Image (spheres, grey):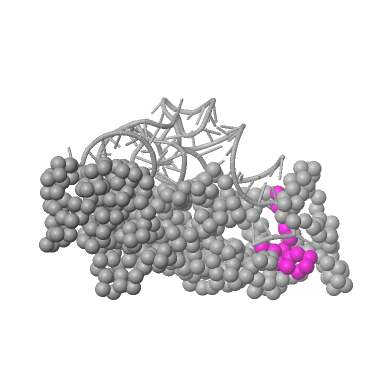
Amino acid sequence: MTDTVRVRFAPSPTGYLHVGGARTALFNWLFARQHRGVFILRIEDTDMQRSSEAMVEGILEGLHWLGLDADEGPFFQSSFVDEHRRAARLLVEQGKAYYDFTPKEEGDDKTVKERISDRVRSQTGREPNPYRDLPVEEALRRVEAGEPAAIRLKVPLEGVSKFDDLVYGPQERDYSDIEDLVLIRSDGHPLYNLGVVVDDIEMRITHVIRGQDHLTNTHKQVLIYEALGVQVPRFAHLPLIFAPGREKLSKRKHGEIVSVTTYRDRGFVPDALVNFLALLGWSPGGDQEIMSRKELIEKFSLENVNKASAVFNFNEADPRDWTDPKALWMNAEYMRAMPLDAVAPLVADQLKKAALWREEYDGEKKEWFTHAIDLLRARYRTAADFAEMGRPYFSDEFDYDPVAVKKNLKDERLKDLLAGLGRRLAALEDFTHDTAEAALRAYSEEQGVKAGLLINAARTALTGQAVGPSMFDIMITLGRERTVERLNRAVALVGQ
RNA sequence: GCCGCUAUGGUGUAGCUGGUUAACACGCAGGAUUCUCAAUCCUGAGACCACGGGUUCAAAUCCCGUUAGCGGUACCA
């Protein structure tokens, strides 16, 4: 039992990695790391006319960003078709599979789905395939003569298939419920169930960790392993992840919102998403939720994987809470706890995308830049917030929130007050948090208004917003010049 | 239709070797912060543990049934 653990993540090349796939990849990766095993990536591209470099690229990108790079691979299932055919032929020779000369039924996915339910409704008992016991020599002769035939596995007529799933426990299925599955299409193309098994054998996979949608079909695969006379790996099926409303996650319907690259583009910290994903269907048992990769690797266990499917609460329509609020919250926690110089690059990326980046942030203004990040991260949830809500700190062109203006710049007296405050600040010998505050408080007292009126008005004047960091921190961060200028600029907005 | 899986507050989960006021987090509501709040802190509401039967002195926890949701059932993956 000292065999090295070898696991694989085997996605279809759908062009992008969605959160469900990412979670599956993560669990495989955690399991591999915990057991000092090997994590392999294999692209399941059989039958994919649409399979292309670009389609694979998105998956690689997502995995890389999450820090789940494979130890081996990527391999492509399509490059092993010869092995698949060889295995099937071997089974035919051994009488464990047979050629089926029944003409193929054509149909697209939808009609096939309908056909399944139609056929199955009308049919009482399963009739054995007429070619099941055709002598091998005769079958071979007909095949050589050019007659098209599919290869089917000869499933035992009676008995039960069993395997012990690491998360769902013992599984049983009656052989009579499993039909003689096709291994190789009549056009010579190997099918999924054969492909996975042959590849997993070839790659010496010890644990197959994948989505629960494969649970009932693994009996078929077990059958293939047995027919091939090879040891069956351990299986662990993971609960599915649903979209809000408990519906299946789909690219068509949910679009980019479920793609992990979206999380990268919208300023997520990879570790935060990893942490969040880990908790979707798994729990270490205690109350701790924020866990580093290291802790995740230590604590992870298939036994603690939940059996019920989970809902991933994203909401495309809401620009603020566009994804699961808990994921957003967790990302905020990460941004605040991370070292500043680890946050800086994430913010820089977002500023660059918004054309707000300046080279000096990486040079002479680096100190200012990190200070600004530190000030703002206390109330932001993603790095993208820096380019949106944080815009006034990095650019003189920003919008004034009408609600904020109405709330804080309503009082007509502010026209004079704002300008007056600007003059006071401009006249200050030193411009620091304390001198600015003292000046403002003294000025408001002279003018007989509450300091709060000026402070809140100034916040809106300087940032266009009603909320934000402590006012004097804002002033210092912006600098005297900009502060005075924006104070004067805002006079025009008073009373609007 | 058949086979299988699942079922704890809005969401993610804990608790499931039977005895707890059913716990934690997110979210939500209210309060505090007289410099705001979408930050922070405090408080609170919210679950008859899907439903119905058992077993037991005692069940969210064990058994059976029902229902619902989901998955599979393909010469798709």
Residue A171 x/y as whole percent: 59, 50
- Residue A375, given in percent of the width and then of the height, sits at 26, 58
- The picture quadrant where one finds residue B32 is top left
**Place of residue A115 in the rendered image (x, y in percent of width and height, measured from the top left):** 76, 49
Q: Is residue A51 above or below residue B12?
A: below
Q: Horizontal and vertical percent for residue A482?
A: 26, 61
Which quadrant, please, contains the C terminus of chain A? Answer: top left
* B28 left or right, relative to A446: right
- Residue A179 in the magenta stretch? The answer is yes
Of residues A280 and A453, the one nearer the viewer is A453
Q: Which residues are magenta?
A: A177-192
A27 vs A392, left or right, is right
Asked if residue A48 lies in the magenta stretch, the reply is no
Residue that appears at 14% across and 41% down: A448
The foreground one among A29 and A468 is A468
Q: Is residue A196 left or right of residue A493?
A: right
Decide whether the magenta segment is chiefly helix, strand or loop: loop
Q: Quadrant of residue A35?
A: bottom left
Task: For residue A231, say whether it is visible.
Answer: no
The residue lying toward the viewer, choosing from A106 and A416, is: A416
| Residue A113 visible in image | yes
Please give the name of the residue rendered at 25% of the width and 47% of the height, measured from the top-left corner.
Answer: A415
